[in-house]
Image (cartoon, helix red, strand yellow):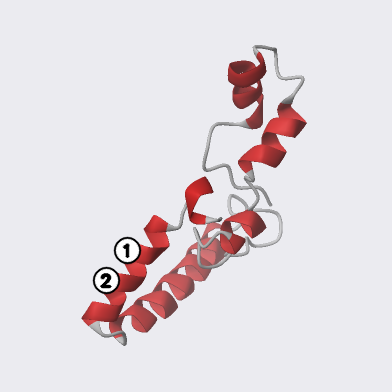
Amino acid sequence: MRFTASPPPEACSGIVWKDDGEHAPEAAEALKPLAADLIEFGIIDEIIREPVGGAHRNPTQAIKNVKKAIKRHFHELLEMDLTDLLENRYNRYRNIGVFGHN
């Protein structure tokens, strides 16, 4: 599963190397667009699995999976003290990006 939060590697390759995408693999490595990378960086909380064949083949199950994850995380947030919640949110966003991972 691949999640591209940033421009596709081909676009990055064209911008950085001024080519037609031949450096896309290098750009993809630098962009870290994989869901596992996003978890490691603390940008996302979890990977919600798609139903077999993809969400477009079973949208009802896909919606149930998303609903379950949202409810679980919402309840976790409700249990947190407001001060801790705000501090965690601040720290999370502050640590996203190159400068947050020294």
102 on left or right of 29: left
Task: Tell me what residue is drawn at x 53 percent, y 69 percent.
Answer: 65
Residue closer to the observer: 78 or 88: 88
Element carrying mark 2: helix
The residue identified by callout 1 is 90
Task: Tell me what residue is drawn at x 43 percent, y 79 percent.
Answer: 72
Does residue 30 lie above or below 18 as drawn? Answer: below
How would you rate the neighbour count of disc 1 (Cα within 10 Å): few for under 14, some for 14-19, many for 20 or more?
few
Label 2 with label 1: CB-CB less than 8 Å:
yes
> Residue 9: horizontal and vertical position, in percent?
65, 30
Quarter of the view holding residue 10: top right
Does residue 12 lie above or below 79 as drawn? Answer: above
The residue identified by callout 2 is 86
Residue closer to the observer: 36 or 30: 30
Outermost residue to the left: 82
The answer to whether one can see residue 97 in this image is: no
- Kind of residue indicated by mark 1: Tyr
Quote the CA–CA distance across marks 2 and 1. Answer: 6 Å
Outermost residue to the front: 102
Element carrying mark 1: helix
- Kind of residue indicated by mark 2: Leu
92 on left or right of 65: left
Does residue 41 lie above or below 87 as drawn? Answer: above
